[in-house]
Amino acid sequence: MWCMLWCMHRTNIYLEDRQTEALDKIASQLGLSRAQVIRDLVDRTLNGEDRDITAGVDAINRSAGALADIEPMEREPDARQSYLGDLIGLSAEADLP
């Protein structure tokens, strides 16, 4: 808490609904606060890591289908499946990825 008060500067920005929703989704997936996601994205941009998104999109496109010949492993229902099932209204025993 001390560093938050003395090491950081508070700023306010206006975001569109879609931006807020996207940030909240990322934050939830990563287990971080929205503020931490924003700080991480600012750092990545300032460090030049996000200057060209084309390379990232190309890597994703090249990887599509890379595991097509591999059989999915069998899994017992777990917390992830239960969570996903709750999101889409299925029981944990349903066939979820």
Image (tube, grey):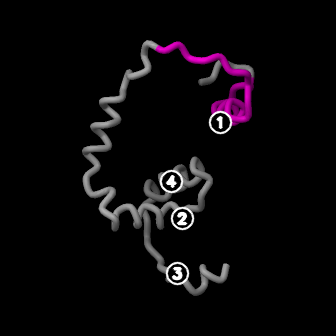
User: For the residue marked with disc 3, what is the amino acid?
Assistant: Met
The Cα–Cα distance between marks 4 and 3, rounded to whole angstroms, is 24 Å
User: For the residue marked with disc 1, what is the amino acid?
Assistant: Leu
The Cα–Cα distance between marks 2 and 1, rounded to whole angstroms, is 25 Å
> Which image quadrant: the N terminus?
bottom right
Mark 2 vs mark 1, foreground winner is 2
Q: Helix, strand, or loop for circle 1?
A: helix
93 left or right, relative to 18: right
Task: Locate residue 65, reporting x and y percent.
Answer: 38, 21
Task: Locate residue 95, reporting x and y percent.
Answer: 65, 18
Height in image: 6 above or below 50?
A: below
User: For the residue marked with disc 4, what is the amino acid?
Assistant: Glu
The Cα–Cα distance between marks 1 and 3, rounded to whole angstroms, is 36 Å
Q: Helix, strand, or loop for circle 4?
A: helix
Residue at the spot 65% in from the left edge and 33% down from the top edge: 84
The Cα–Cα distance between marks 4 and 2, rounded to whole angstroms, is 15 Å
Q: Nearer the viewer, residue 61 or 66?
A: 66
Residues shaded magenta: 70-92
Q: Are marks 4 and 2 in contact (CB under 8 Å)?
A: no
Residue annotated with mark 3? 8
**Figure quadrant of residue 14:** bottom left
Residue annotated with mark 4? 21
Mark 4 vs mark 2, foreground winner is 2
Residue at the spot 60% in from the left edge and 18% down from the top edge: 73
Height in image: 75 above or below 3?
A: above
The Cα–Cα distance between marks 1 and 4, rounded to whole angstroms, is 16 Å
Residue at the spot 44% in from the left edge and 54% down from the top edge: 18
State which tag comes first along the sequence, 3 or 2.
Answer: 3
Task: Locate residue 16, reporting x and y percent.
Answer: 42, 61
